[in-house]
Image: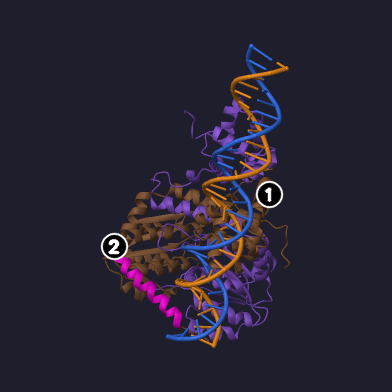
Chain colours: A purple, B brown, C orange, D blue
Amino acid sequence: MGTNQNLTVAERIKQKFDHLTRAERQLANAILEDYPVTGLGSITTVSENSGVSTPTVARMAKKLGFGGFPQMQAQLHTELKATISSPIAKHDLWSESAPDTHILNRFADAVSENMRQTLKQIDPEEFNAVVDLLSDLKREIHVVGGRITRSMADNFFTHMQVMRSGVTLVAPNSNTWAHYVLNMNKGDVLVAFDIRRYEHDILRLAEVAKSRGVTLILFTDQWGSPAAKLATYSLNSRIEVPSAWDSLVVTLFLVEAVIAGVQTQTWNETKSRMKTLEELFDQTKMFKKFI
Amino acid sequence: MGTNQNLTVAERIKQKFDHLTRAERQLANAILEDYPVTGLGSITTVSENSGVSTPTVARMAKKLGFGGFPQMQAQLHTELKATISSPIAKHDLWSESAPDTHILNRFADAVSENMRQTLKQIDPEEFNAVVDLLSDLKREIHVVGGRITRSMADNFFTHMQVMRSGVTLVAPNSNTWAHYVLNMNKGDVLVAFDIRRYEHDILRLAEVAKSRGVTLILFTDQWGSPAAKLATYSLNSRIEVPSAWDSLVVTLFLVEAVIAGVQTQTWNETKSRMKTLEELFDQTKMFKKFI
DNA sequence: TCAATTCTGAAAATATAATTTCAAAAATAA
DNA sequence: TTATTTTTGAAATTATATTTTCAGAATTGA
């Protein structure tokens, strides 16, 4: 039988519409009405919604060239997925001169997808709340990272330090952390970075900080660090890429966006401060000689 | 229990995410990935697609406040119907719940554009050459960053150090750099990071290194650091974003891609090394107590 | 009109889905 | 480490969905 297997359900219905019986046409119209959502329920639901019996539904599915109702439904799922998912051609972006299989392009695809997924899941209210908290000059801010995320913590610290006072970077070596804890007071904020291969020390620090009334902001991955349950705000980013390691690209994106947010928020108070600091760097740069 | 009945599945997941278990989070991420289509199949399909068991799916549905899986699915159907019938096809990237003008979305647009432009301009041959050079175990590698790019240098160093021996991170304080120069020999590689507000010290170090027969790989911005003229390979990334600072997101992308390249190239020699190191970290993690 | 044919859905039969139970595995606490 | 708790999925159970059967209803052609 010459039924083309690649047709959509809607196309098949239209093609065969003349050969459908009265009850089948009724069903077909119901399916096309809110296409493809109506077809997604159980055969019972579909039959009820269109006022026909379940055998009619099953029969029509076969008539349209499917093995049965479940097969027709699977096709509807596939179609829906194609409709819903991004219409943006995946890699018109990327490096054209390199083949699709080149690590650059595979990496780019993965990072781009990570970005998309992360942004889809982020709660802007939560983001705003984080920015507000970090813009509050009355609160001291403590920043800590793990073995791999240390660079994120460092980057965050470097920028925050320019914008405001009262920012501390907790040293990587956890032996010294007791001293940092002494300086954490009620109302302070701890910004922690913890991704897969979650570090026990970070969790411990978060616990101790929490017990001292410190608010925890956590940058973690899609699965969530164990410290997440202690966090008031946690910003999760997708980190999987075709590599033996995880990608911090999206995490860095969030960090930079938060920094930009804080900068906007505190601009009035901090613009002169920033200018002075920048000038200082420019000057010292001039006079240093190392060799 | 006070669960609001009018929340979407996605909202419920986000709300309860921190209280979900490992397998449940895995499932939650799978559902959010192609939301809401992934959740539309049978409980069996959903469980298979997300790599968890059917009881886990049923349990999570209850945990999210539904009577069971079918109830959760009904909610997904309702949501889908609402989505489909709304004619406004939002650009599905980025955070839909935030307005276009929100810093998150403006930042995302900028970063995405930076990524596109950067990849368009990168020469895959040059990229490959950089990977080859860094995979050559006979060459010592020296890594240096500036005030802002230090975190990039640090990140690069951390990963390279796991994969191979002979990698040195040049300390941030340029007073001490003379010592590092003493250890640079002909054939060595200097990986330098230098973006806008180019740092004079980096240029000086590059000059000195060059005079000792060291090959320079430079990560810089679209305009190119003054050190670019000394570099054998330079990887330029776009860094402009709506912020007082520049964005290192794309630079980090290139760094991670290079690392992934080196990893692939040296896999045979380094896999055991990597494994051992990872295990070491896992162990020390267990026994350290800081407080 | 009536007989032949096709269509349809109630009900039975079958297949699959969803939930529950429970023992093993993993995580956590002591 | 060892004990305790929590989490997890295989297997059993239960509930639903899907298909099949078949008798009656609707349609068609004379």
- In the displayed structure, A39 sits above or below C28; it is above
Q: Amino acid at mark 1?
A: Thr
Q: Which residue is mark 2?
A: B268
Number of marks in the rendered image: 2
Q: Which residue is mark 1?
A: B78
Crowdedness near tag 1: few (<14), some (14–19) or many (≥20) residues, C-alpha within 10 Å = few
Quarter of the image where one finds residue B220 = bottom left
Q: Residue B135 in magenta?
A: no
Distance from disc 1 to disc 2, alpha carbons, whole Å, reads: 52 Å
- On the rendered structure, is A283 left or right of B255? right
Q: Can residue B270 be seen?
A: yes
Mark earlier in primary sequence (1, 2): 1
Residue sitting nearer the eye, A255 or B283: B283
Find residue B284 and report its horizontal and vertical position in percent.
Answer: 42, 80
Q: Which quarter of the rendering shows the C terminus of chain A?
A: bottom left
Q: Over which residues does the magenta segment extend?
A: B268-287
Chain letter of the residue carrying label 1: B
| Disc 1 and disc 2 on one polypeptide chain | yes
Q: Residue A164 placed where, x, y %? A: 63, 72
Q: Position of residue A47 (x, y in %)?
A: 66, 40
Q: Main SS of the magenta segment?
A: helix
- Which residue is located at x 51 percent, y 59 percent? B249
